[in-house]
Image: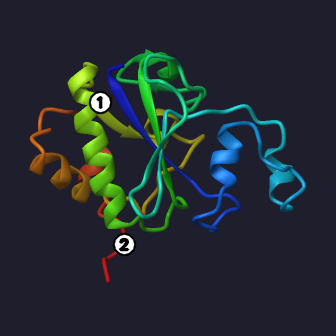
Amino acid sequence: MSLLVVHSISLPPGVYGGPEIEQFFTNRLDWDAHPYFATIRGMRVSAHFLVRRDGGVVQFVSCDRRAWHAGASSWRGRENCNDFSVGVELEGLEGERFEPPQYEALADLAVALGRRYPIEDVAGHEDIAPGRKGDPGGGFDWPLLRSCFGRRGVMHWGFPDSATRRNGPPRA
C-alpha cells in the first residue's frame, strides 16, 4: 500500500452519527429505510476505514486486503488504485467542511499506517478519479491536514497539486 485515499460519505446525505454508513459497508443497510437508499441499492463498495465527525475510527477491511473504494482511478501513472491504496472515508459531504477531530484522527491513522506500509502519497478521491468523483471536495482543508501530518513528523508524503490551492471554507 503506497497511497492513502481520502473520501467522504454520509448516509442519508447530510445526516451524521447514525448507523447507516457502517450498515452500508457491511452489507446490512435496510434499502427501504430512506428514499435515498434506493439510488444506491445494490452497490458493492468497501473502505478500509471510516472517520466519524467526532474523530472515532472504524475499520471495515484489513489493510492487507483490497477494498473497493477507488473505482476507475489512477495516481501518478498507475491505474487501479484499489490495488495499492488504503481508502479512508470521512463522515461528511463533499463541499462542506469537516471537523477538527477528523483531521487529527486521520493524521494519527496515517502515522500508524506509515509504520507498517510504504505509503508515499495522500490524495482525495477527486484526485484519483477526476471528473468522475468530487470527494472529499472543496470543504476539505488540505493545509490543515498537512499541518497535522507535520506535527506528527509525516512530512515526506506527497500531496496532490490541488492541495496547495484549496483551503476549505473559513473556520468559525
- The amino acid sitting under disc 1 is Leu
Name the residue beneath numbered marker 2: 169
Residue under numbered circle 1: 113
- Foreground of the two, 68 or 166: 68
**Can residue 160 be seen?**
no
Disc ID at residue 80: none
Name the residue located 42 percent from the left edge and 54 percent from the top edge. 56
Residue 67 position, x and y percent, is: 55, 25
Q: Nearer the viewer, residue 50 or 129?
A: 50
Type of amino acid at the residue the image marks with label 2: Pro
Q: Residue farthest to the right?
A: 32
Instruction: Name the residue at 22% across, 57% down.
Output: 143
**Colouring convention used in this rendered image of the protein:** rainbow
Left/right of residue 97 with respect to residue 71 in the rendered view: left
Residue 131, position as x, y percentages in the image: 56, 42
Q: Secondary structure at mark 2?
A: loop
3 to 164, vertically: above or below: above
Q: Residues within 10 Å of mark 2 (few under 14, many from 20)?
A: some
Q: Quadrant of the C terminus?
A: bottom left
